[in-house]
Image (spheres, grey):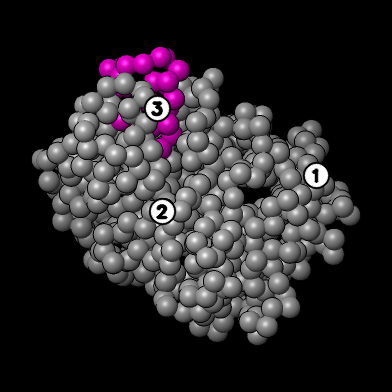
Amino acid sequence: MKSIFKYMFVGLLSCGTLTSCLDGALETFPTDSMSGDGLLSNASSALVPLNGVYRSMYSAWSPSGNTHQAFGISAYTLMADVMGEDHIMADQGSGWFWYDCLYNVKPRYTSKSWRSYDLWNAYYTWVSNANYILAAETTMGGATADVNYVIGQAYAIRAYSYFMLAQSFARTYKGHETEPCCPIYTEPTVAGTEGQPRATVQAVYDQITSDIDKAVELLEGTKTKHISHMGYAVALGIKARIALVMEEWNTAKEAAHEAIKASGCVIIPVDQFKGVNSTKAKNVMWGAEIIADQSGMYASFFSHMDASAGKYGQSALKQINKELYAKMGSEDARKVWWNPADKANENGGYQQEKFKFSDIKTWMGDYVWMRVEEMYLIAAEAECRLGGAEEANAIKDLMALMAKRDKNYKCEKSGTALGVLSSDETGSLLEEIITQRRIELWGETGRIYDLRRLKQGFRRTSAMGWPKDALLGNRPTNDPECYMWVLTIPQSEFDGNVNMDPESDQNPTGDYK
């Protein structure tokens, strides 16, 4: 097959039917009695492949022996977090995520055991699966609301996947619209399908916005069947995230507010969800409910985060930047998410307690991918950016969160100034909103994605708690416009795609660029 899909692991096209892929790789429901056409013939049976896609979003399924750092969305969030300044890796440990932290993965694009292949493969697999479902849009039987529920989610999955590909394999949207991004596929692929060339950043974002708008349109009025599903509120939340990157402030504000309303979720005090590990919490909009036979065990988010469970969480402690921790007031309830008194801190940052197994004995703990608090912070940022009378609304949305975090918190700041580096303080309202976002969503949304869109550089210092080996003194971390933060495209893509040239289409391969 002369295309990107040549090497997809759970991609539907690599099997004779949807059945064999979903039954063997995703293990969501037994499907061996149904053909692919049968599964997509009506909205009820189409939930099987749809659930299969979601199952793969939290499964350790890397085909290259890299599963312990390749377990879906939560793995890529952790990757993006340790690339920044706030989420400290205190040591190399077993090596997982350490090379992301050191920006030492780009030259390894020829290997199927490293990040470029893993991430590219995962997101394009979800694009491929979504395309198969979307091909049945006009033929799928069932009540209109049920069909809309399935098709709307497929559009949301494709939008989300291209959005994350764009953030990983190209520079940020604003100012780079004409630069190359990634290939676009909107139809099912079969053996012999010709690979597409890299589309521009603008073209990819046009596809993203078209897909997410279609998802919102179709999902409105439908009832979300499971917390893992991208229902109406989650589609709006993703739309709000996209709008932040595109700097479309009105869209971000409106989508975030509608997501809050549609979700039915509420901001809850920290003592009601001390650990972010349950999708049953009233503030959770989207996540993976992990059941007993679906735990990734060592190949899981909590095995890397929870030091009390031993293994990776203990050998490579995850800690907060001390300078960020110090920005919390003395009464800020979020302080319980980190432990300055932990003996394991030594000369590092402060050990995290935010992400722990809900039951260590059975390796249980849900993955939370979107909380309602994020929507308030998105709305606040967008309103602050709009300025004028909207500043008051920005403070109102910020205070809605902070009233549940610190009883003494007040904010009388104004303006949108940001420092060249994240550590260069300006005292502006926008900086304050971003600071509270950094604290509230630590470990949840991937810090590097924010740094890219904000076009801020960063620094790591020993005073923050960073180990000497990870200070990045020889990296241009002060330059968010450089290609240091842009992943290289895997060699396997060039090997299978006649419309991509490794000489002209590859991103800069050096870690220092």
Query: Which disc, if any, is residue 12?
Result: none
Q: Position of residue 188 (x, y in %)?
A: 23, 33
Residue 164 or residue 509, whichever sits in front: 164
Label 1 close to label 3 by CB (< 8 Å)? no
Helix, strand or loop at mark 1: helix
Query: Mark 1: which amino acid?
Result: Met
The image quadrant of residue 147 is top left
Above or below, 242 relative to 275: above
Query: Mark 2: which amino acid?
Result: Asp
Magenta residues, dominant SS class? helix
Q: Residue at x 27, y 28 (%)?
A: 39
Q: Is 388 placed left or right of 463 in the picture?
A: right
Residue 342 located within the stretch drawn in magenta: no
Q: Position of residue 376 (x, y in %)?
A: 69, 41
Q: Position of residue 276 (x, y in %)?
A: 62, 55
| Region of the chain picked out in magenta, as a range | 133-157
Q: Residues within 10 Å of mark 2 (few under 14, many from 20)?
A: few
Helix, strand or loop at mark 2: helix
Q: Position of residue 156 (x, y in %)?
A: 43, 34
Which residue is tagged 1?
399
The image quadrant of residue 168 is bottom left
- Distance between the alpha carbons at the discs numbered 2 and 1: 41 Å
Residue 149 located within the stretch drawn in magenta: yes
Query: Mark 3: which amino acid?
Result: Val
Q: Residue at x 57, y 73 (%)?
A: 307
First-in-chain label (2 vs 1): 2
- Distance between the alpha carbons at the discs numbered 1 and 3: 37 Å
- Distance between the alpha carbons at the discs numbered 3 and 2: 25 Å
Q: Residue at x 59, y 40 (%)?
A: 285
Residue 36 or residue 455, whichever sits in front: 36
